[in-house]
Image: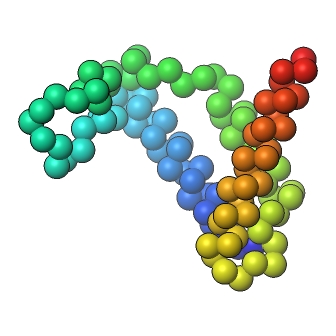
């Protein structure tokens, strides 16, 4: 359970960090070892924060998701971190499929 929670917190922090970096215009799609040849990633390169579309409802979605994971505790009792992580991923997939179905019914 603790490893699933740790994974969730790390993932949420990573997403939040990417969003903050994107808002500051610090996101680059080019890897340090990429060749001199242009790629599709170069065409989609981000030069300023205005180029990034972060839906305004994303923070609320992440907050609701985090609360749901804590309540459900999908990896409860698992001692193997890989199994716990896989259960968290599967639960997350099912959670968002359910949310999508609910949204389509509205």
Quarter placement of the C terminus: top right
Seen as rendered, the residue at the extreme bottom is: 79
Q: Is residue 30 left or right of residue 93?
A: left
Q: Is residue 51 left or right of residue 33?
A: right
**What residue do we see at 29% from left, 30% from top?**
41
Give the colour scheme of this rendering. Answer: rainbow
Residue 90 at x, y percent in the picture: 73, 55
Residue 27 at x, y percent in the picture: 34, 35
Q: Is residue 22 left or right of residue 92?
A: left
Residue 18 at x, y percent in the picture: 45, 40
**Where 48 falls versus 80 (above or below)?**
above
Observer-nearest of 15 and 85: 85
Observer-nearest of 39 and 61: 39
Quarter placement of the N terminus: bottom right
Observer-nearest of 79 and 13: 79
**What residue do we see at 66% from left, 80% from top?**
80
Decide if residue 89 is in sight here: yes
Q: Is residue 20 left or right of residue 35?
A: right
The image quadrant that residue 83 belongs to is: bottom right
Residue 8 at x, y percent in the picture: 64, 58
The image quadrant that residue 78 belongs to is: bottom right
**Where 83 falls versus 69 (above or below)?**
below
**What residue do we see at 73% from left, 63% from top?**
87
Decide if residue 63 is in sight here: no
């Amino acid at each position: 359970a603790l490893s699933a929670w740790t994974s969730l917190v790390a993932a949420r922090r990573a997403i939040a960090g990417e969003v903050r970096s994107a808002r500051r215009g610090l996101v680059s799609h080019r890897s340090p070892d990429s060749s001199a040849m242009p790629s599709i990633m170069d065409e989609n390169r981000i030069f300023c924060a205005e180029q990034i579309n972060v839906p305004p409802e994303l923070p609320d979605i992440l907050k609701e998701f985090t609360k749901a994971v804590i309540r459900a505790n999908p990896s409860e009792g698992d001692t193997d971190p890989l199994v716990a992580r896989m259960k968290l991923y599967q639960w997350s997939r099912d959670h968002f499929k359910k949310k999508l179905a609910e949204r389509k019914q509205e």
